[in-house]
Image (cartoon, helix red, strand yellow):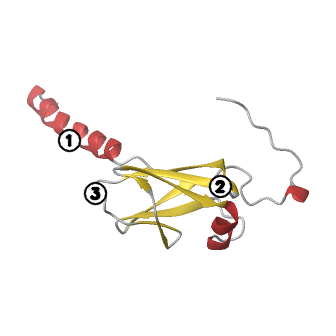
């Protein structure tokens, strides 16, 4: 490959890396809240007024570009398919999937063992 061709590839590679880093995926985790256990969903958006939906239900969020929402686990279970492993998060109409915490839909009587290690 001629040396000039190598220099032409750098902007292409940098452009694809930048677009991959620009929009991090939303994330989920279980937290305690006033109503019991809640699912904390966090994400980013370019416009602080852009609507956010979880599994097709528009929700109120806290924050501007970096947002978060707490949903009672029972509400989230009602909005989800049985044994779901992901949640659909829509920000301004653009949908992405986020992984749910392990054991989110397992009934305690069917759970044999769950090992949680600190980070």
* Residue linked to disc 3: 47
| Residue sitting at the far front | 34
> Residue 53, relative to residue 111: is it above or below?
below
Q: Position of residue 72 (x, y in %)?
A: 65, 61
Any mark on residue 12, and which?
Answer: 1
Q: Position of residue 108 (x, y in %)?
A: 86, 56
Q: Judge left or right: residue 25 versus residue 45.
A: right
Camera-near label (1 vs 2) is: 2
* Residue linked to disc 2: 38
Q: Judge left or right: residue 97 versus residue 35.
A: left
> Residue 13, relative to residue 45: is it above or below?
above
Task: Using the rendered view, name the quadrant where residue 49 is placed.
Answer: bottom left
Asked whether the beta carbons under mark 1 and mark 3 sit within 8 Å of each other, the answer is no
| Residue sitting at the far top | 3
Residue drawn where x is 51% and y is 73% of the image: 57
**Badge 2 density bin: few <14, some 14–19, many ≥20, Cα 10 Å:** many
Quadrant for the C terminus in the image? top right
Residue drawn where x is 34% and y is 50% of the image: 65
Residue drawn where x is 67% and y is 72% of the image: 78
In terms of secondary structure, where does tag 2 sit? strand
Q: Position of residue 106 (x, y in %)?
A: 79, 58
Quadrant for the N terminus in the image? top left
Asked whether the beta carbons under mark 1 and mark 2 sit within 8 Å of each other, the answer is no
Q: Position of residue 92 (x, y in %)?
A: 34, 66
Q: CA distance from mark 1 to mark 3?
A: 27 Å
Q: Nearer the viewer, residue 58 or 18?
A: 58
């Amino acid at each position: 490959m001629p040396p000039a061709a190598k220099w032409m590839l750098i902007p292409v590679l940098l452009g694809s890396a930048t677009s991959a880093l620009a929009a991090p995926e939303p994330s989920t985790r279980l937290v305690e809240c006033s109503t019991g256990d809640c699912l904390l969903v966090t994400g980013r958006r370019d416009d602080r007024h852009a609507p956010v939906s979880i599994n097709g239900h528009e929700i109120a969020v806290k924050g501007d570009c970096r947002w978060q929402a707490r949903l009672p686990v029972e509400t989230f279970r009602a909005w989800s398919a049985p044994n779901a492993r992901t949640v659909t998060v829509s920000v301004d109409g653009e949908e992405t999937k986020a992984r749910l915490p392990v054991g989110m839909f397992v009934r305690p009587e069917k759970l044999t063992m769950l090992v949680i290690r600190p980070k």
